[in-house]
C-alpha cells in the first residue's frame, strides 16, 4: 500500500485515486513482499557493487527487483539537478517517490545513493510503512574510498574541479541507527551473506499465499 500523505497536496482540485488492485495483490502475484533497500555511504564505499551482487542473488531466488543507481538517475530523471544542498534534496525526493511507486507495484527496489544528509534519508523513510524502507549503511573509511577512486572523482575534487563533493567539500552525516550496518572493508561475499541473513531480508518471504 502506498504510504500517502494528503497534507503534501496543497491543490484542492487534486484527489487521491484508490486503485482496485493493491500492493498486497501484487505481492501475492510476485510471491514475496516488496521493500526498498536503501544503500548509503561515501562515493567508492561499495554501494553499487553490493547492490548489483545482491540483486543477482535475489533474482536467482525468483524475487522481482529493480536497481536505482545514483549516476544512472542523473542521466535522466534528475539530469537537470546539480549538487547544491537544494538539488541534492530534490534528487533524493524524486528517487524516493519513484521507489515508492515501484514498491507499490510489488517490486524489491535497491537504491544506491550517497544521500549524505540524515533529513533526506528520513524523508524517504517517511514515505513508506514500517518494514518497507531498509537503510543499509556501507561504512567504508574515507581513506579507503579515496584510494579506490575508480571514477577519478576524489582526485578531481581535490584539485577543485568538483564542488560540493561529499567527504571533501561537503559533509556526510553518518546514519546513527541503520537497519543494516556493513563494514565496507570486509569482502563482498561476507557482506552479501550478512544482508541475506538479516531479518529485513527474511521479511521478503513472509507472505500469506493462502488468501
Image: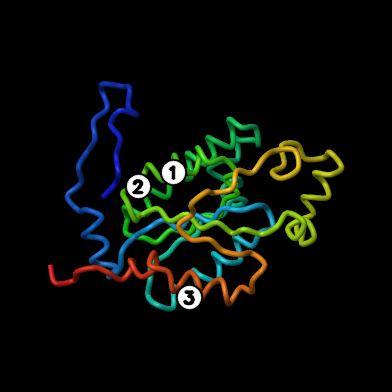
* Residue toward you, 36 or 117: 117
Residue 142 coordinates in the image, percent (x, y): 73, 54
Label 3 Cα neighbours within 10 Å, binned few <14 / some 14-19 / many ≥20: some
Q: Are marks 2 and 1 in contact (CB under 8 Å)?
A: yes
Q: Is the residue marked by circle 1 packed among few (<14), some (14-19), or many (20+) residues within 10 Å?
A: many
Tell me the element at label 3: helix
Tell me where residue 122 appears, x and y as whole percent. Answer: 45, 42
Q: Considering the numbered disc 1 on the image, is that residue within a helix, a strand or a loop?
A: helix
- Measured Cα–Cα span from mark 3 to mark 1: 25 Å
Residue holding disc 3? 57
- Where is residue 71 drawn, in percent x and y? 62, 51
**Residue 39 or 97: which is nearer the viewer?**
39
Above or below, 152 relative to 195: above
Spot the residue most to the front.
176
Residue at (37%, 60%) from the top-left corner? Answer: 107
Callout 2: SS: loop
On residue 124, the disc is 1
Mark 2: few, some, or many residues within 10 Å (few <14, many ≥20)? many
Labelled disc at residue 128 = 2
Of the two numbered discs 3 and 2 on the same chain, state the one appearing first in sequence.
3
Residue at 61% from the left image edge and 64% from the top image edge: 183
Q: Are marks 3 and 2 in contact (CB under 8 Å)?
A: no
C-alpha span from label 3 to label 2: 24 Å
Q: Earlier in the sequence, mark 3 or mark 1?
A: 3
**Distance from the alpha carbon under mark 2 to that under mark 1:** 7 Å
Amino acid at each position: 500500500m502506498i504510504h500517502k500523505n494528503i497534507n503534501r497536496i496543497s491543490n484542492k482540485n487534486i484527489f487521491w485515486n484508490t486503485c482496485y488492485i493493491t500492493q498486497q495483490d501484487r505481492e501475492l502475484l510476485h510471491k514475496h513482499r516488496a521493500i526498498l533497500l536503501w544503500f548509503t555511504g561515501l562515493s567508492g564505499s561499495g554501494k553499487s557493487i553490493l547492490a548489483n551482487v545482491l540483486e543477482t542473488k535475489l533474482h536467482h531466488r525468483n524475487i522481482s527487483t529493480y536497481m536505482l543507481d545514483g549516476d544512472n538517475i542523473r542521466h535522466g530523471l534528475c539530469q537537470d539537478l546539480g549538487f547544491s544542498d537544494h538539488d541534492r534534496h530534490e534528487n533524493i525526493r524524486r528517487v524516493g517517490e519513484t521507489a515508492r511507486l515501484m514498491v507499490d507495484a510489488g517490486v524489491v527496489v535497491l537504491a544506491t545513493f550517497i544521500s549524505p544528509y540524515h533529513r533526506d534519508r528520513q524523508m524517504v523513510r517517511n514515505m513508506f510503512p514500517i518494514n518497507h524502507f531498509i537503510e543499509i549503511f556501507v561504512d567504508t573509511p574515507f581513506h579507503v574510498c579515496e584510494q579506490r577512486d575508480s571514477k577519478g572523482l576524489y582526485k578531481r575534487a581535490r584539485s577543485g574541479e568538483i564542488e560540493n563533493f561529499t567527504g571533501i567539500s561537503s559533509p556526510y552525516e553518518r546514519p546513527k541507527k541503520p537497519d543494516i550496518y556493513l563494514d565496507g572493508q570486509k569482502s563482498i561475499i561476507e557482506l552479501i551473506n550478512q544482508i541475506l541473513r538479516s531479518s529485513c531480508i527474511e521479511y521478503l518471504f513472509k507472505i500469506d499465499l493462502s488468501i
